[in-house]
C-alpha cells in the first residue's frame, strides 16, 4: 500500500526500515525526492508480500538508505526476494514465521561475530548504510538509533512499544508499531541530512560524506559498496589498493604476509627515538637517559611523569600530555598566549623517518608518500571545486589510517614498531621544543601530542619564532610538518582535553566538556546532555553574561534535556504523587518543578552486581520524562527548574576560577642565550 504525502516524480533515494515480530512483518519506506511513504504489511489481517517485492524490484530505487541495513534489514529483504516464489501456498502467519525465524538467526549469529548470510554484492537493492558510514558498528562507538534520536533532538525517542515475541496483535497495536517505525525512518532521514551536511549550526554544513564517497568511487574505481564504508575503512582501502598496484600482490598475499610476519616485541624507547633528539639541561637529559632503557609494553598502559618549571608532563607510549586541571589563564597586556601545533604530525613522521611495516617492505612507504602527494594536489585545487576538497579529505584518511592501522593486530599493515616509533619519537621531539622554549625564557603551560601552549612577554615573540624555526630545522619539519599558530587572550581549562580558548579575533575554540554543538556527525554518539551548561559557560567566559541570565532566557527545551541509557539488566521508573510509571532502557528527561523522582531499577531476573535502586538526580531535584516533546510548546510551559542548571554551571565556574591564577613567567635558572 502507498501513502501519498506529496505528489511528484518518483526518484532514486528511499529511506527505509523493517520490523520483524513473531506475528508481523512490516516494511516502511520514504522517498526523499517525492515525499511519498510506502507501507507493506504481512500479518493475519493482510499480505502485501507481492506488492513489496514489486516495489523492491521495479528499479526505481537507486539506493536504499538505512541504519544497519547491511547487517540486518537488507539481509531480511534479500531473503524475501530469494524465497517469496516458494510461499505461494502458505498462509500469512506462516510467511511471517519464516521471516521472523530468519531475522532471529541473524541476530543470534551477530552475538558470535558470524558473517551474515548475504554479501553486499548479492543485494538486489544497493544500500547506503549510515550505521556503517559513521562507524557505529565499531565496539568503541557502538550506538543505537534511539540514542541518536536523543542527540539529534528528535521530538519522539520512544522505544518499541511491543515486544517482538508477542503472538497476537490487534490492528490498533499494529498501528502503534507503524507509528514507531515511521519515527525511526524520520530519525534515519535526519541522520542522512547530517551526513550530507544539510543541518544548521554545525561546522561541516555543506560537506557531504556521501558525495565524497561517490567521487572517490569514480576516482579509484572502488566497488559500489564503498559508499557505506566508514572513514577508517576508506583510508585502509586506499592504502591497500595503491600497495597492491605497486607490488602486484593479492588480498590473499597480504593476508599471508601479515600472518607470517613474526612477533614484534622487546624494543625500547631508545629504539623509537630518532637520532636528532637531544637535550641541553640536566633535568631533561636525566629524564631522557632514564627513559631510553624502558621497554615498550604492547599490552599495558604506561605513564611516566616529568615536571619542569611547574608544568607536569605525562609521557606514555601513545603520546605526551600535560596534567593541568581547572584553571583560567588571561593574557595580560604586553603578554602573549600562543598555541603551536605540528601539522600532519604522524603522517609526516612516517615519511621523514622512512618508516614502513617490515613485512610489507619499502614499497608500502612509496605508496604512502604518493598518497600524501596526491592529497596535496587535491588540497591546492580544493578552493575551485567541492570534488577536489572531498578527495583531499579522502586521501587524508589514507594517511591517518596508514599510521593508525599499524597498531591494529588484525590489519594487514600491523607493525607496532612503526606505530610507536611515531608516537614515542614525536613526543620526545615535542619535549625538545618545550626545553628550548624554557631555556629561552618562554614558559610552556600546556602540551599535548602534537603541540604546546606558551605564555610569555611579547618582547620575546621574535625569540619564540626563532626557537620554532630552529626546532623545525632540527627535527626535519621545515617543509612538511611545520608549526601552525593561534593566539588566545583567554584560556579556560578543565584539563588538557577540556578547554575553551578565546582567540584574539573573537573566535572560540572548544574541546571536550565545553563543546556546545557536534563537531561532525561523527560526534552524535556522544552524550550531549545538559547542553545549556556549556552554552552558559561560553557566554560567561566570552561575554561576562551571568549564567542565570543565559539559562533563564534560553528557549530551546532540548538543551535542558538529559539522556540516560541502561543495560539489559535495568529499566527506569518515575514515582510522582505515589504513582509509578515504568520506562524502557533509554529515557530523556529534564529537571523540573513539580516533577517526580526518576529511578534506575534492577530487573527481577538480573544477576548484575550493581545497586537495586538508584536516583538519576540525587537530593531535592525532581524530573519530568520527556521522551515525547512538542516543539511548538512554549518554553514556559515546561516548568523547568532553572535553579538546578544554574547551580551546576556555577559549580563548574567555581572549580575553574578557584584554581586559576594570573600566570607569571618563572624563568628557568638554566636559561641560556642560544637563540
Image (spheres, rainbow, N blue to C red):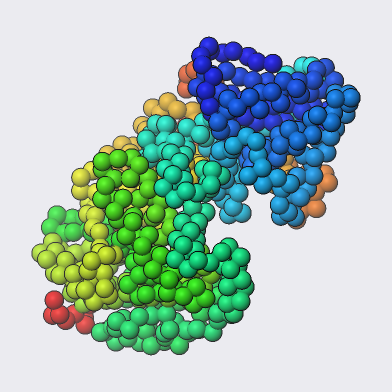
Query: Where's the C terminus, which quadrant?
Result: bottom left
Q: Position of residue 140 (x, y in %)?
A: 58, 54
Q: Residue at x 55, y 31 (%)?
A: 62
Q: Position of residue 499 (x, y in %)?
A: 37, 52
Which image quarter: residue 55?
A: top right
Location of residue 263 with respect to 110 vertically, above or below: below
Q: Is residue 229 left or right of residue 571?
A: left
Which image quadrant is residue 176 in?
top right
550 is higher (above) or lower (below) than 71:
above
Quadrant showing the N terminus: top right
- On screen, residue 577 versus residue 166, left or right, reads left
Q: Nearer the viewer, residue 208 or 199?
A: 208
Q: From the viewer's side, name the closer residue of 137 and 430.
A: 137
Q: Looking at the image, which residue is at 33% across and 45% down?
A: 389
Using the rendered image of the protein, determine whether residue 259 is visible from the camera's viewpoint.
yes
**Residue at image coords 45%, 88%:** 293
In the rendered view, does 66 fall on the left or right side of 339? right
The picture places residue 378, in percent across and down from the top left corner, at 31, 50
Which residue is at 32% across, 72% downward? 352
Q: Is residue 665 visible?
A: no
Q: Nearer the viewer, residue 318 or 650?
A: 318
Q: Is residue 279 above or below residue 209?
A: below
Task: Tell me where residue 613 sits by quadrant.
Answer: top right
Amino acid at each position: 500500500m502507498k501513502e501519498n504525502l506529496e505528489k511528484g516524480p518518483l526518484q532514486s533515494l528511499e529511506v527505509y526500515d523493517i520490523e520483524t515480530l513473531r506475528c508481523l512483518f512490516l516494511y516502511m519506506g520514504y522517498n526523499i525526492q517525492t515525499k511519498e511513504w510506502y507501507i507493506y504489511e504481512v500479518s493475519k489481517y493482510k499480505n502485501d508480500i507481492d506488492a513489496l517485492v514489486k516495489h523492491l524490484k521495479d528499479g526505481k530505487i537507486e539506493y536504499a538508505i538505512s541504519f544497519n541495513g547491511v547487517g540486518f534489514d537488507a539481509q531480511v529483504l534479500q531473503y524475501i526476494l530469494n524465497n517469496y516464489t516458494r510461499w505461494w501456498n502458505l498462509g500469512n502467519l506462516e510467511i511471517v514465521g519464516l521471516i521472523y525465524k530468519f531475522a532471529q538467526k541473524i541476530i543470534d549469529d551477530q552475538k558470535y561475530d558470524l558473517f551474515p548470510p548475504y554479501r553486499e554484492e548479492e543485494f538486489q537493492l544497493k544500500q547506503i548504510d549510515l550505521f556503517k558510514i559513521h562507524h557505529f558498528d565499531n565496539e568503541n562507538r557502538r550506538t543505537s538509533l534511539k540514542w541518536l534520536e536523543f542527540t539529534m533532538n528528535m521530538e519522539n525517542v520512544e522505544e518499541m512499544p511491543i515486544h517482538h515475541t508477542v503472538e497476537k496483535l490487534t490492528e490498533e497495536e499494529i498501528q502503534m508499531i507503524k507509528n514507531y517505525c515511521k519515527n525511526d525512518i524520520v530519525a534515519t532521514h535526519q541522520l542522512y541530512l547530517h551526513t550530507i551536511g544539510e543541518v544548521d549550526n554545525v561546522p561541516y554544513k555543506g560537506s557531504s560524506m556521501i558525495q565524497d564517497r561517490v567521487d572517490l568511487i569514480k576516482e579509484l574505481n572502488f566497488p559500489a559498496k564503498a559508499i557505506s564504508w566508514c572513514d577508517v575503512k576508506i583510508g585502509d582501502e586506499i592504502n591497500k589498493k595503491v600497495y597492491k598496484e605497486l607490488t602486484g600482490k593479492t588480498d590473499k598475499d597480504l593476508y599471508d604476509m601479515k600472518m607470517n610476519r613474526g612477533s614484534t616485541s622487546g624494543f625500547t624507547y631508545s629504539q623509537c627515538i630518532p637520532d636528532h633528539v637531544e637535550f641541553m639541561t640536566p633535568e631533561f637529559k636525566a629524564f631522557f637517559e632514564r627513559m631510553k632503557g624502558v621497554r615498550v609494553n604492547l599490552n599495558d598502559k604506561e605513564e611516566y611523569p616529568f615536571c619542569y618549571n611547574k608544568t607536569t608532563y605525562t609521557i606514555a607510549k601513545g603520546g605526551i600530555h600535560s596534567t593541568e586541571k581547572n584553571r583560567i589563564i588571561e593574557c595580560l597586556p604586553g603578554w602573549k598566549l600562543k598555541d603551536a601545533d605540528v601539522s600532519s604530525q604522524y603522517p609526516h613522521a612516517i615519511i621523514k623517518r622512512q618508516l614502513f611495516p617490515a613485512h610489507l617492505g619499502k614499497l608500502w612507504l612509496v605508496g604512502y608518500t604518493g598518497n600524501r602527494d596526491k592529497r596535496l594536489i587535491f588540497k591546492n585545487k580544493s578552493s575551485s571545486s567541492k570534488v577536489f576538497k572531498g578527495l583531499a579529505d579522502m586521501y587524508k584518511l589514507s594517511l591517518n589510517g596508514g599510521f593508525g592501522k599499524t597498531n591494529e593486530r588484525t590489519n594487514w599493515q600491523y607493525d607496532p614498531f612503526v606505530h610507536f616509533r611515531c608516537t614515542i619519537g614525536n613526543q620526545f621531539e615535542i619535549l625538545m621544543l618545550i626545553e628550548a622554549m624554557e631555556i629561552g625564557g618562554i614558559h610552556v603551560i600546556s602540551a599535548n601530542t602534537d603541540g604546546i601552549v606558551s605564555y610569555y612577554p611579547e618582547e620575546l615573540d621574535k625569540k619564540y619564532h626563532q626557537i620554532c624555526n630552529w626546532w623545525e630545522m632540527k627535527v626535519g619539519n621545515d617543509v612538511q610538518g611545520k608549526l601552525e599558530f593561534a593566539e588566545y587572550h583567554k584560556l579556560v581549562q578543565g584539563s588538557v582535553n577540556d578547554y575553551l580558548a578565546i582567540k584574539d579575533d573573537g573566535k572560540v575554540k572548544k574541546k571536550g566538556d565545553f563543546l556546545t554543538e557536534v563537531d561532525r556527525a561523527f560526534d552524535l554518539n556522544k552524550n550531549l546532555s545538559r547542553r545549556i551548561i556549556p552554552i552558559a559557560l561560553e557566554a560567561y567566559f566570552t561575554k561576562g553574561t551571568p549564567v542565570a541570565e543565559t539559562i533563564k532566557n534560553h528557549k530551546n527545551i532540548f538543551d535542558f534535556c538529559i539522556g540516560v541509557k541502561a543495560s539489559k539488566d535495568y529499566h527506569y521508573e518515575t514515582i510522582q504523587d505515589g504513582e509509578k510509571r515504568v520506562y524502557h532502557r533509554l529515557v530523556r528527561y529534564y529537571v523540573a518543578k513539580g516533577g517526580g523522582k526518576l529511578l534506575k531499577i534492577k530487573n527481577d531476573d538480573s544477576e548484575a552486581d550493581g545497586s537495586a535502586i538508584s536516583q538519576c538526580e540525587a537530593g531535592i531535584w525532581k524530573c519530568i520524562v520527556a521522551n515525547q516533546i512538542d516543539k511548538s510548546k512554549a518554553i514556559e510551559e515546561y516548568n523547568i527548574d532553572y535553579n538546578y542548571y544554574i547551580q551546576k554551571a556555577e559549580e563548574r565556574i567555581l572549580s575553574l576560577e578557584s584554581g586559576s591564577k594570573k600566570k607569571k613567567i618563572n624563568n628557568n635558572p638554566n636559561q641560556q642565550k642560544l637563540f
